Image (cartoon, grey):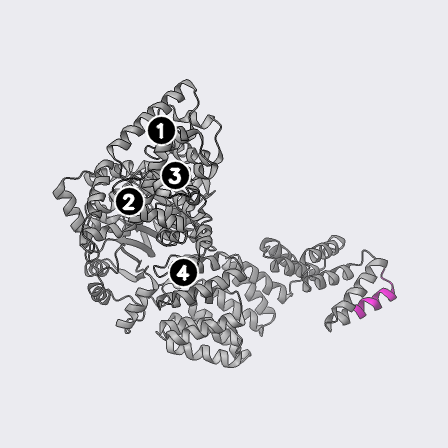
Amino acid sequence: MVSPKTEQLLATAVGHHQAGRLVEAEALYRRILVSDPNNVMGLQFLGVLAHQTGRSDIAIDLIGKAIALNGRLPDCHYNIGAVFQALGRLEEAATHYSKAVTLKGDFAEAHYQLANVLAQQGKFGEAVTNYQRALALNRNYVEALTNLGNVLAEQGRREEAVARWRQALALRPNYPVALMNIGLAAKHKGKLDEAVGLLRRVLALQPDYADAHYNLGNALQDLGQWDEARTAYRRALAYKPGWFEPVGALVTLMLAEGNIAEALDVARHALAAKETRETKSAIVACLRSPLVHPGLGDLRDLLVRALSEPWTRPAELAPSCARFLALNNAVGQGIARAMQAWPNLLPAEELAGSAGLAPFAEDRLLRALLEFTPICGVALERFVTGLRFTLLEAALTAAASAQAEPVLNLYCAVSRQCFINGYVLPQSDAEIERTRLLRNDVVASLATGAAIPAVSLLAVAAYFPLHTLPGAEGLLNRSWPDAIAAVLEQQVRAPLDEQRSRASMPVLTAIEDDISVQVRDQYEENPYPQWVKIATTDQPETVDAYIRRKFPLSPFVELGKSSGVEILVAGCGTGQHAIETAKQFKAAQVLAIDLSLTSLCYAQRHTRALGLDNIRYAQADIVILSSIGRAFDVIESSGVLHHLADPSAGWRVLLSMLRPGGIMRLGLYSEIARRGIVAAREFIAARGYRPTADDIRRCRQDLLNCRDGTPLHNVTMFRDFFCLSECRDLLFHVQEHRLSLLEIAAFIAENNLQFLGFDIEAPIRRDYARQFPNDVAMTDLAQWHQYETGNPSTFIGMYQFWVQKNR
């Protein structure tokens, strides 16, 4: 029994609590618990107060004790559920909210909060049921009506969603949340002026509503009203500092305007306020921009982090890294000396100058660049070729046994770079002969168990992949410094693991088509692309949310699938894109197929290392892939169909496997953009270069010697030019087709497809919008053809675009 005195104290404490006098309330709750430690209500209310004052762990402990004493009180379960929900512990929150409604069936607030948690978990069907139960108990529950509309919209039931939001407005006229959602629904339908009007009305009612400012910015940007959009994004940030979405939108807008300095300032402030994947993405957008330059300040530390963690594909940062290396005077001077001496290679004392190699070795950006991605740029390539030569010299002299640790680490990075770029650096006959002697010495020492000088091993690794040495596995059984162990992991352990995986790789179809056999053989020799690290990604999202975010005005009909999405990556290569897709989409199951076992095993090794279990790899040929009898919601095939004997036939095979309403992402070569590549392929054919490593190296040097500004020299500006497997794919591929946008448009029209939009940089989208303001959705391929004709390098990589199969 609770004494009358305790009851009176509890009533007084609750009065203080409800009036916001939290200090007084807490003192009385604690006084009650001193005399009655098992007072359930005192424990519960003190726990609620602890949560309100930021002490959630204490709240869970106190309310948990109350539940242990009496688990039949629905309010206790509701209150601890609220704490778990605030902490993001959604399963525990759902469990306690469910218990609350079991104990008290008419507990409308518990039904409502349970629905909110279920919606956060992507369990939209169950969320709808619980919102409806809350509304059955309280038909005027405005928040429940509004959130029910939100979930219906997530399910693609947009007309029903708008009806719920209008019901909420009827109950609470000018309710900002419902009004904003109706504005977003108008934007979704392409009614931009109506959306802007509704969002301005929201802000007249609630000027500090950050979400409304952000959504107004998006609508204004779609209308091409860039200055007003920028103002809206800034206001969103002013009212909600550290919120990423307006930061990302503002940075993208500034970059599209060419305002790199301001974009970088916004991104750096956001990162300083809070390091998240989102703020890092804003920094990456700036760092990978061709507008970023050393005059903006020393960004090397940011570049090192972005490469090493990594924040994006390291290869995307390689050009910017090359520019910022010059901020190290020693490196800048070394690059200049290497360029001036070319084609002669300088000994270490001439390449490095009086300071020696230490300033190179201590440059973290240089080492990170060498270790994580193929370098790009002629000057940097010649500098690294010179560093490799100094490594070879050191291995052949007494200096081999006297390398300082930083210099040894630099040499390790050089060896790792040579492996990553497929040994694309030019090799003189003298270097090859001297390296073969070192290689023979290493092989002999492996056979006899004799010591192997570290520098000798690294010199060999800079010219030959170590796993090709007889007995290479024995290198793993020796003790090495960490930097050398990393080289052996890369050049011995990983390739051997991949070779062992070949026998167990599933085979879905035969590979018998003549062109398919030739393409397979090419990628067996040179798997594409070479990569080391995968980017950290944002939180997974549904396919519908992703497409709506990328193409807000496209005629996309939502799939309505929040889980269990089946995705085919047709032509996955070494797995980089397949892994990104598996991480991008919520609850996706990915089948990734390719012709090349070497590429598939490379992909599978990385996938296992990342702990991903939602990708299945298999060998198969697109030409006959429909024989497997599968259907998919999403099919991605980037940079693949144009290597088939008949790209259109391959495209139709994939379409036959796409479910009605399914979407497809494709990458196809542009006839207009690849004129320089065509000229280079003609140059290669005329001179009789073969797709061998030696001939590719010689051909590259001949192309570099072509006059600047000519189509032949221009191919040397492609990033793929600086890695052997990528260069072979770029210039020596056994089969290449190119298309125009008019041909693609004709295929789309003939095959019951809807064009959704291009994956393309913001500056190009903005420039297109200026020239073709009537195409607000940016889906008119005839107008895009006009734009590309006037801007031939627009699709210099590929046409990367999305289509949807009509139901």
Q: Quadrant of the C terminus?
A: bottom left
Pointer 1 local density, CA inside 10 Å: few below 14, some 14–19, many at least 20? some
In this orientation, does residue 333 appear? yes
Judged by its main secondary structure, the magenta piece is: helix
Q: Secondary structure at mark 4?
A: helix
Seen in the image, is 271 located left or right of residue 8?
left
Residue position for label 4: 286
Question: Which of the numbered marks, if any, corresponds to residue 396?
Answer: 1
Residue position for label 3: 416
Q: Position of residue 782 (x, y in %)?
A: 21, 66
Q: Residue furthest front?
A: 354
Nearest to N terminus: mark 4 or mark 3: 4
Q: Give the residue displayed 44% in from the left and 36% down from the top.
A: 408
Q: Secondary structure at mark 1?
A: loop
Q: Position of residue 660 (x, y in %)?
A: 32, 56
- The label nearer to you, 1 versus 4, is 1
Pointer 3 local density, CA inside 10 Å: few below 14, some 14–19, many at least 20? many
Pointer 4 local density, CA inside 10 Å: few below 14, some 14–19, many at least 20? many
Residue position for label 2: 726
Q: CA distance from mark 2 to mark 4?
A: 25 Å
Q: CA distance from mark 3 to mark 1?
A: 20 Å
- The label nearer to you, 2 versus 4, is 4
Which is nearer the eye, 345 or 564? Answer: 345
Q: Amino acid at mark 2?
A: Glu
Q: Amino acid at mark 3?
A: Arg
Q: Which residues are magenta?
A: 1-13
Q: Give the residue displayed 59% in from the left and 53% down from the top.
A: 91
Nearest to N terminus: mark 1 or mark 4: 4
Q: Position of residue 712 (x, y in %)?
A: 18, 51
- The label nearer to you, 2 versus 1, is 1
Q: Secondary structure at mark 3?
A: helix
